[in-house]
Image (tube, rainbow, N blue to C red):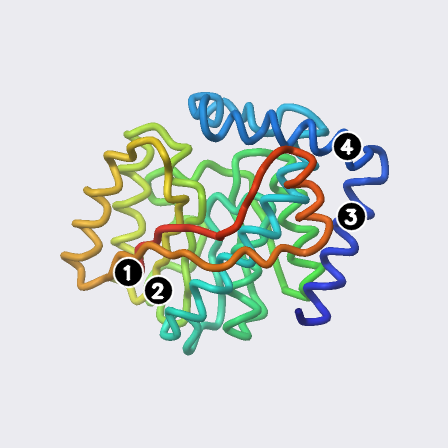
Amino acid sequence: MDSLTTAWLDALERRHLADLTLSEVARALRALSSCYVERRAKLAESGALSSNGKRAAFALFYGPQHLLAMRAILGALSPATENVTRVIDLGCGTGAPGAAWAVAAHARAIRGFDRHPWAVAEAGWTYRQFQLRGQVTRASIAVPGLLNERTAVGDLHGTAILAAYAANELASEGRAILLASLLQAHGRGARILVVEPIARRAMPWWADWRAAVERADGRADEWRFPADLPPTQRALAHAAGLDPRELTARSLFL
């Protein structure tokens, strides 16, 4: 593991275990996992980030998992890192997936958007840990014209746009707006990557998104990588009764 990532993981522990024990975070992780698997309606209401414990669990457990999964996906999609000068991170969460793309592409500039104030602060902190020139704005990613209003209008060659673990938390109308924005940005030259979990429950919208991406000569993939988690994340998983033997995800790439 590279030195920046090791330093980030160490700083992550200091940041989120300053006022909470590992056992307290593990209990929150159990509740957070239940929210994702059984009560996804709460995600639209930001229920997953409703307490200090859940926020710590999200940052400490899911953030590193998302970063590792993103790195593995980018390694398999080598064109994704070529000639990228900036990353736009839609629904950035803790900022880990977007940071992974920016670092892998040697793109120092990154712009994040998220509707939750905690995520805005956390993503900004993450970008700084990875020595990225970053800016994070509190905004919904399901707004028509977001990419036109908040980014340079016109040519987007050299721009990579990421929507990781974000589209599934939107209502159907918001997802339609986001898909249209992503396709329009691709038409302006942007590289697009959408990442979502391989869900146990049905995701009927995914088939429509996949068809739209494939019509635009993109690709759809499902990924399974060995879960070689760092020690703290392994300890959290064990304490919370989780057994992540694989890092899994599905993606759409243009």
Q: Is residue 32 left or right of residue 221?
A: right
Q: Sequence-wise, which precedes: disc 4 or disc 2? A: 4
Horizontal and vertical percent position of residue 121: 67, 43
Residue to which mark 2 is pinned: 191
User: Real-space Cα distance between discs 2 and 3?
Assistant: 33 Å
| 2 vs 3, front mark | 3
What kind of residue is marked 1?
His
Residue to which mark 1 is pinned: 186
Q: Sequence-wise, which precedes: disc 1 or disc 2? A: 1
| 4 vs 1, front mark | 4
What kind of residue is marked 2?
Arg
The image shows residue 115, relative to residue 212, as above or below, that is above
Residue to which mark 3 is pinned: 13
Q: Sequence-wise, which precedes: disc 3 or disc 1? A: 3
Which element type, helix, strand or loop, lies under badge 3?
Answer: helix
Q: Residue at x 53, y 71 (%)?
A: 104
Which element type, helix, strand or loop, lies under badge 1?
Answer: helix
Question: CB of mark 1 within 8 Å of CB of mark 2?
Answer: yes
